[in-house]
Amino acid sequence: MTIESAEFVIGISSLSAGRTSGVQLPNDELPEVVFLGRSNVGKSSLLNRLCGKKELSRTNASPAKYREVNYYFVNRSLYFVDLPGYGYAKVPEQVRASWSNLIEEYLQRRRNVSVAVQIVDARHVPTELDLMMAGWIEYYHVPYIVVMTKADKIARSKLTMYVDQTRAAFARHRYMREIVPFSSVTGQGKQDLLNAIAHQVQSAKD
């Protein structure tokens, strides 16, 4: 898979509010690839690197940005959907809970999700929040790819060990399809991830 075009479409903070306010989410039944990850795990940088646009998804944004579902139209054939980063520490618990509800609402209501991309920090064992999110994805029977960002910060001689640790953490999860080490700095894993996404999108069509 090669990305030839990518553009921002819409950002919305509530799926139900969107219906009542007249804001329309895409309803053309094109495949949706959803990206999830803890706040500050490098999700925006990953999206920018994948799409070849430095400012497609703003990095270092305020918490207001993190509470939105953001749609990007890719290759005029599918959507990349950036869900709010979970676990953002600098906001009240009530706000974090509302973001979690938005993520679950999206997974529950959107019917065109072909694959999820769950992003974890390559330097650490997946957290309890990461595994909880994976549980939600599993509950809605969505196949997903685990992406280990910031892989460039790990010595090559140790990367396999870190991948094995991550694989063990997700070992009991039926819908986890692949683990991809990734670096937004060097581009490591970019083509592997794009190929994995393309494979899952095609599998969802078959």
Image (spheres, rainbow, N blue to C red):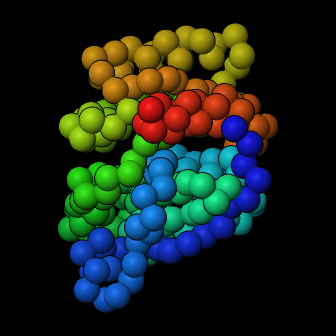
Quadrant of the image containing the N terminus? top right
Q: Is residue 57 visible?
A: no
Question: Looking at the image, which residue is at 47% across and 50% down?
Answer: 31
Where's residue 182, x and y in %? 64, 33
Residue 156 in picture, x, y percent from top left = 72, 16
Residue for point 51% across, 39% down = 201
Question: Can you tell which quarter of the image residue 144 is in?
Answer: top left
- Which quadrant, please, contains the C terminus? top left
> Residue reaching furthest front?
206
- Residue found at x 43% / y 17%: 167
62 to the left or right of 110: right
| Number of numbered discs visible in the structure rendering | 0
Residue 11 on image: x %, y %: 47, 73
Compared with 118, 88 (above or below) is: below
Instruction: Give above or below for 19 relative to 36.
Output: below
Residue closer to the observer: 154 or 186: 186
Camera-side residue of 139 and 91: 139
Q: Residue at x 48, y 56 (%)?
A: 30
Determine the residue located farthest toward the bottom in the rendered image.
21
Report whether 122 appears left or right of 2.
Answer: left
Q: Is residue 200 visible?
A: yes
Quadrant for residue 88, please give it: bottom left
Q: Position of residue 195 (x, y in %)?
A: 64, 31
Query: Up-down: is 146 above or below 3?
Result: above
